[in-house]
Image: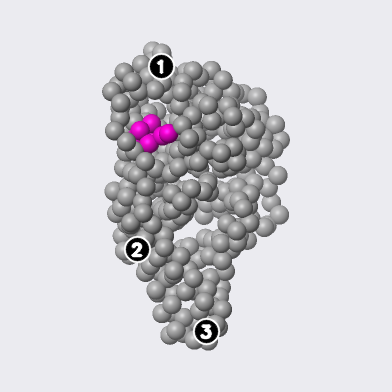
């Protein structure tokens, strides 16, 4: 019982520290922008595979970016789509010289990350100082490129923005809160100078840092190429940062089915296991809380329920404060229901991760 109380107290203190860092030690890396003629040349990259339902809104949002048209080139790679994705892309780029398209019909090799392969090939054709990345199921904000460029410094090597699950149904809202919780921790860790991860759907890398890291060719055996390249940059002495603001907010779609969520989480969990041992240990402590607190409720219901309620309250305070930095509001009721969702999804992810089955992503199999 004493270990459960100590563990609960540690989680509450951890969430209090996270909230304090967001509320009082938050780092905003943006700075006043240069005049248009002094802005750097950028290249925006998009790899798409079977995204016919998402591409129209994604491409339209990219076209609306408030960045000088003569300073940006869009590179789109179709990764062997079997639906109408290539047709949609081809029709979109017609008559738009600042859009470049390549098709990749040859299947990726076994164990090779198809998205990393496509991006690596697209980058070979780019002549820009800064590379920006997003995904086909995302919609960038009009100020996305300007905000990401404004927050970047050469010593960072890489900058990650903030991505929001924009679905309004209950399952989507729960995923959104889980993202806010995870990204909040990433932000706090980044603000104290450590690299935890990056997000390939909202990311900027300088051409110099990309070349020094070996590029996506060096990490295309990883199913989480964004995490892998950020780790390489950190090891090279760069200090990737995480920018949180409305300007760099990107909306994405949640996973529609629980099975799809588990397949996504299994891929992410594979990447998370490459983190340093102490991060894996902390993640393990988070998951161990649930079975321990449920057992504690059976023997000491009032004491354990009180501790659980305190943990939910402080965790909710942190999540709301973090989301507010991107001018996003989260319902109190959703935060209350989130704990039951988080209990179930986190343990389901663990069980599915250790289940002897391959990782499946974009209709490809990874052992």
Residue in the picture at 51% in, 26% down: 207
Q: Looking at the rendered structure, which numbered label has been put on residue 317?
A: 2
Magenta span includes 149: yes
Disc 2 from disc 1: Cα separation: 44 Å
Q: Residues within 10 Å of mark 1 (few under 14, many from 20)?
A: some
Mark number for residue 98? Answer: 1
Q: Is residue 175 magenta?
A: no
The residue beneath circle 3 is 298
Q: Is residue 218 visible?
A: yes
Image position, residue 73 (x, y; %): 42, 20
Q: Which quarter of the image is occupied by the C terminus?
A: top right
Cα–Cα gap, marks 1 and 3: 64 Å
Query: Residue 264, image x and y in percent?
Result: 55, 48
User: Element at badge 2?
Assistant: helix
Tell me if I can see residue 91 in this picture.
Answer: no
Task: Specify the segment rendered in magenta.
Answer: 147-153
Circle 1 SS class: loop
Of callouts 1 and 3, which one flags the residue occurring earlier in the amino acid sequence? Answer: 1
Tell me the residue at 53%/70% (across/down).
289
The quadrant holding residue 354 is: bottom right
As helix, strand or loop, the secondary structure at mark 3 comes to helix
- Cα separation, mark 3 vs mark 2, equals 27 Å
**Residue situated in front as seen by the camera: 283 or 297:** 283
Which of pointers 3 and 2 indicates the residue nearer the eye?
2
Q: Position of residue 116 (x, y in %)?
A: 59, 32
- By secondary structure, the bulk of the magenta-drawn segment is best described as helix
């Amino acid at each position: 019982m004493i270990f459960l109380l100590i563990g609960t107290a540690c989680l509450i203190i951890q969430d209090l520290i996270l909230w304090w860092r967001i509320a009082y030690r938050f780092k905003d890396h943006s700075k006043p922008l240069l005049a248009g003629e002094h802005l750097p040349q950028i290249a925006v990259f998009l790899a798409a595979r079977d995204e016919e339902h998402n591409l129209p809104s994604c491409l339209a949002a990219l076209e609306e970016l408030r960045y000088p048209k003569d300073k940006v080139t869009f590179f789109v790679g179709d990764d062997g789509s079997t639906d109408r994705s290539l047709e949609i892309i081809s029709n979109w780029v017609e008559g738009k010289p600042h859009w470049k398209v390549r098709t990749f019909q040859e299947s990726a090799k076994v164990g090779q990350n198809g998205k990393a392969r496509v991006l690596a090939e697209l980058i070979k054709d780019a002549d820009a100082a800064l590379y920006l990345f997003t995904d086909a199921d995302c919609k960038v904000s009009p100020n996305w490129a300007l905000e990401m460029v404004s927050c970047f410094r050469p010593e960072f090597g890489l900058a990650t923005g903030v991505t929001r699950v924009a679905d309004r149904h209950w399952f989507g809202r729960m995923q959104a809160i889980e993202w806010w919780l995870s990204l909040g921790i990433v932000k706090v860790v980044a603000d104290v100078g450590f690299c935890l991860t990056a997000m390939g759907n909202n990311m900027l890398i300088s051409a110099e840092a990309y070349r020094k890291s070996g590029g996506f060719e060096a990490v295309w055996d990883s199913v989480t190429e964004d995490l892998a390249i950020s780790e390489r940059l950190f090891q090279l002495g760069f200090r990737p940062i995480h920018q949180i603001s409305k300007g760099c907010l990107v909306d994405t779609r949640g996973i529609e089915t629980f099975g799809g969520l588990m397949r996504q989480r299994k891929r992410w969990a594979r990447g998370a296991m490459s983190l340093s041992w102490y991060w894996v240990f902390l993640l393990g402590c988070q998951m161990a809380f649930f079975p321990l607190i449920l057992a504690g409720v059976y023997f000491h219901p009032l004491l354990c329920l009180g501790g659980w309620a305190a943990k939910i309250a402080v965790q909710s305070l942190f999540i709301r404060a973090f989301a507010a930095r991107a001018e996003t509001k989260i319902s109190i009721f959703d935060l209350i229901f989130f704990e039951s969702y988080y209990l179930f999804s986190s343990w389901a992810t663990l069980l599915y991760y250790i289940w002897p089955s391959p990782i499946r992503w974009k209709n490809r199999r990874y052992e």
